[in-house]
Image (tube, grey):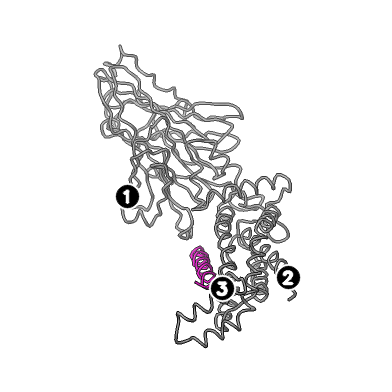
Amino acid sequence: MEKRTIIAVGLSIAVFLLFNFLFPTPKQKPAPVNPPAQTAQAVTTAQPTGAQSSQTAPPAAQDVTVETDLYTAVFTSQGGRLKKFVLKKYSETPSPNARPVTLFEGKTPDAYALGTQSRELALDPNALYNVSADKLLVKQGEKKELAFTLATPQGYQLRKVYTFDGSGYGVSLTHQLQGAAAAGKVSDLGLTLTFQPDPNVKVSQFDIYGPATFSEEKARFDTLKDLGKGPKAYDKGVLWTSFGDKYFLQAVIADNSSIASTRITQLPNSNVQTLIALPPLALNPGQAVSVNHRLYFGPKDLDILKAQGSRLESAIDFGWFSVIAKPLLYGMKFLYGYVQNYGVAVIIITVILKLIFFPLTHKSYKSMKQMQKLQPKMTAIREKYKSDRDAMNREIMKLYQEHKVNPLGGCLPMLVQIPVFFALYKALMFSIELRHAPFMLWITDLSAKDPYYITPIIMGVTMFVQQKMTPSNMDPMQQKIMLALPVVFTFMFLNFPSGLVLYWLVNNILTIGQQYYINKSLGT
């Protein structure tokens, strides 16, 4: 296969991938856990959840606000569920007065998150729990609990305890169930996680928007389109399950194998719900059994996710070349610590990569130049042996050997760089560090497109200049097709994040300088 064929294939793959991308009531005390001697009495006094007496149930649903330096969370006694979660350190837009990011908000009770379900316990999702506080302020370095308590019709006492750490985004959730007078087993206790897709969000096939589950040693991403065809279920080695978009994540993490299985379903109202099945719980009379989970509602920051454990950092999909993408991202963050500008960090990373690959690209361009010099002789051979293809190939190979030219010498060094390109593409595309990060002048958000399309147009011009300077042994028609690529890429890059455009632009400028140096050193 001739080198230009391989280049064309590589460019076709790149074009295909890039094209697809474009598209307050009084404070209530928690109900005490009944000791064994009182369990029988609990059985006789407990009534069905929907008709609990005024002595055991709050008169109305009560909201509880939890404040930390990082977030504001609103829970409700109606099911002990989460109604709203707001991230204080992240805003909707780069504007100084922009609203903080609302990571989750259930508009109606059926959309609340972290509900507890069980048919065996006859749990009503809207049951009113007693709650331990009407508000909670958790300062840096502190840990505080919020407990919701419910007496079930069978005489069990159910407690949901959320433990908040003022130093991070992680939250602990404990379900504690105390047995009734007789021994029993609860095998269908479940926890729900709810996701409300935004119909205004446009997602390409390479974006992450929807559920993800780590099962069988791998993060598995399901699209909304997949769920439209039917539920997805995972029951082997589940470490965590989540909903996420490009920059933020809401996840339930197993603690000591506390996730038996998950079932992800798209509901009739278009919401997506994951039912997380807990392991079966066996209880002796009066015994209290607990099962723990960890929650994460926060940014898709690689370091923060990794600190949560359970391989939660896998929720960031870096694709096939993650082993390259992660070091590049860490390198960019390291450089930012010195230059305090992610745009400058991207430029430095681009220069470093160019220097690393300089020997390969130098060899590639030199081989291409040699091939260009042999083009007249190759044309003559093709004309002479046009009716005998085998003879033509033998003569061309003989020509290569006489002049010590490798026909793949111009292709292989370029192919080696393809994994690095796609890894850097992923690192820049899904890096929350670039979100709302300014560069200079009119570029105030490296994760958004250039508002005036200046950098994509300049990038297209540099790509055209690069094509003109590159040695070629193509026929006139192939050359015209190659010269059309800068126009195609320019239109595709118009809506790309300016951080990616900046990388490609700087890379083109460096390639032009490199080509000028090579042409001059070869006397052309």
Question: In this image, 348 relative to 169: left or right?
Answer: right
The answer to whether residue 438 is seen in the rendering is: no
Q: Which of the pair 330/344 is nearer the observer?
A: 330
For label 3, the residue is 488
Q: Helix, strand or loop at disc 1?
A: loop
Q: CA distance from mark 2 to mark 1?
A: 57 Å
Task: Point out the frontmost of discs 2 and 3.
Answer: 2
The amino acid sitting under disc 3 is Val
Q: Helix, strand or loop at disc 3?
A: helix
- Taking the view exactly as shown, the residue that stands out farthest to the top is 37
**325 versus 515 height, above or below:** above
For label 1, the residue is 231
Q: Residue 97 appears at what percent x and percent y?
A: 65, 50
Magenta stretch, overall SS? helix
Of mark 2 and mark 3, the one earlier in the sequence is 3
Q: Which residues are magenta?
A: 1-23
Marking on residue 524:
none
Q: Residue 305 appears at what percent x and percent y?
A: 53, 40
Of mark 1 and mark 3, the one earlier in the sequence is 1
Q: CA distance from mark 1 to mark 3?
A: 39 Å
For label 2, the residue is 516
The amino acid sitting under disc 1 is Pro
Question: In this image, 81 relative to 515: left or right?
Answer: left
Rate crowding at label 3 as few (under 14), some (14 to 19) or many (20 or more) other CA atoms within 10 Å.
few
